[in-house]
Image: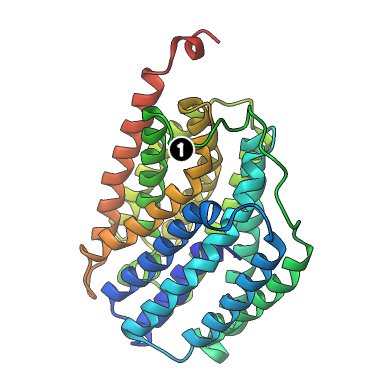
């Protein structure tokens, strides 16, 4: 549930815009503030909450999210944006709970791949179910009602969470401190990677409408993308340790730039759906490789520990920047912003690859 919004958000926020409860700019702002608060919470939860009472933390976060998702059904405009911002805080804490376990594992890239696959499968099931059975009879409020019910189940599942983390070993993470300079570059790459994706993806529903598609095409595109994301995460998990992070990331980002150009020409519905599937596969296939990128850049794993927070901040920055470039009649500015940020991401990872230490070059 911590990252459910990333998959369901475009569908539900697009529905809020079409019903008049959000403008196109407010759509981007609502996506921005929720993801921003998720990133801040995921980054600060460790220092503020420690490694104890994890079970209580999980239960309380689930209950808070239940109330906030229900509250969303009664508000609109700037108040709705505020409610979603607050909802991002318990969501980010849940992401921190899982990240702490992944970074403590001996194969963090495999753990990251499994995590991304499972979370994407959950998003797929929710989006497909909401699109098929909820939106038509109950409207967008029904979708947030589903999220409230799932949040309540999450609070119940929190009773099974371990009450504390096991200690980090010296190999997993050195003494407390900030990442190395190369670690900060890796974090910047993670931020830009998620920013270029969400800058475009948060506007996929109005982009489909602007392309002249039937009302159900956007929901189908999101569902296809999520299905492809499950396949991409599974492929990344299976290939963990067999493919270098550089080849995986550079190849995937290059292909995603090509897909963005296709979205920018307002393609027909079949091509739109196909590109959505390809984009989703590459998105989640590439994402787990940000972890070995960060570990190679900063072997203390301090950067890797901050990676999800940096990625979430990128998820917030992308929609915010895109909201400055779109209007109610044309949202393609989000696509061209995505291309620019993708090129920055590619430049950062190429720079890290070309300047890696000699010990890594000869290993």
Residue 254 percent location from the top left of the image: 38, 36
Of helix, strand and loop, which one carries label 1? helix
Q: Count how many numbered circles sit on residues in the image.
A: 1
Q: Quadrant of residue 107?
A: top right
Q: Is residue 308 left or right of residue 161?
A: left
Q: Nearer the viewer, residue 320 or 233?
A: 320
In the image, residue 131 sits, relative to residue 248, either above or below, namely: below
Tell me which residue sits at (57%, 58%) in the image: 49
In the image, residue 9 sits, relative to residue 21, either above or below, namely: above
Q: Nearer the viewer, residue 291 or 262?
A: 291
Q: Is residue 224 left or right of residue 355?
A: right
Residue 57 percent location from the top left of the image: 64, 66
Q: Can see residue 218? A: no
Tell me which residue sits at (55%, 90%) in the image: 138
- Location of mark 1 (residue): 252
The quadrant of the rendering that contains the C terminus is: top right
Residue 249 percent location from the top left of the image: 46, 34
In the image, residue 80 sits, relative to residue 300, either above or below, namely: below
The quadrant of the rendering that contains the N terminus is: bottom right
Tell me which residue sits at (36%, 33%) in the image: 185
Residue 150 percent location from the top left of the image: 66, 75
10 Å neighbourhood of mark 1: few (<14), some, or many (≥20)? many
Tell me which residue sits at (48%, 11%) in the image: 361
Q: Is residue 329 left or right of residue 268?
A: left
In the image, residue 150 sits, relative to residue 107, either above or below, namely: below
């Amino acid at each position: 549930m911590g990252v459910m919004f990333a998959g369901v958000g475009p569908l539900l926020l697009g529905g809020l815009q079409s019903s008049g409860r959000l403008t196109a700019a407010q759509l981007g702002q609502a996506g921005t503030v929720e993801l921003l608060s998720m990133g801040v919470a995921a980054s600060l939860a460790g220092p503020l909450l420690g490694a104890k009472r994890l079970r209580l933390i999980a239960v309380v976060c689930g209950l808070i999210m239940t109330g906030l998702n229900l509250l969303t059904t009664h508000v609109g405009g700037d108040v709705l944006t505020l409610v979603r911002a607050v909802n991002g805080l318990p969501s980010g804490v849940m992401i921190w709970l899982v990240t702490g376990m992944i970074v403590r594992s001996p194969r963090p890239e495999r753990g990251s791949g499994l995590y991304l696959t499972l979370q994407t499968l959950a998003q797929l099931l929710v989006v497909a179910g909401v699109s098929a059975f909820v939106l038509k009879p109950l409207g967008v409020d029904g979708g947030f009602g589903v999220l409230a019910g799932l949040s309540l189940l999450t609070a119940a599942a929190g009773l099974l969470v371990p009450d504390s983390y096991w200690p980090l070993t010296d190999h997993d993470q050195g003494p407390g401190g900030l990442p190395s300079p190369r670690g900060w570059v890796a974090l910047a790459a993670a931020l830009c990677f998620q920013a270029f994706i969400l800058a475009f993806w948060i506007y996929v529903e109005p982009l489909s409408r602007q392309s002249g598609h039937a009302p159900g095409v956007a929901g189908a595109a999101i569902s296809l993308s999520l299905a492809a994301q499950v396949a991409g995460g599974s492929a990344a998990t299976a290939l963990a340790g067999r493919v270098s992070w550089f080849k995986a990331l550079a190849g995937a980002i290059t292909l995603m730039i090509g897909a963005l150009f296709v979205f920018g020409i307002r393609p027909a519905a079949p091509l739109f759906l196909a590109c959505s599937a390809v984009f989703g596969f590459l998105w989640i296939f590439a994402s787990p490789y940000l972890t070995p990128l960060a570990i190679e850049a900063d072997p203390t794993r301090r950067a890797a520990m901050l990676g999800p927070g940096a990625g979430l901040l990128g998820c917030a920055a992308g929609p915010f920047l895109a909201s400055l470039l779109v209007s109610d009649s044309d949202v393609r500015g989000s696509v061209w912003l995505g291309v620019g940020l993708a090129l920055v991401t590619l430049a950062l990872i190429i720079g890290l690859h070309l300047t890696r230490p000699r010990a890594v070059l000869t290993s």
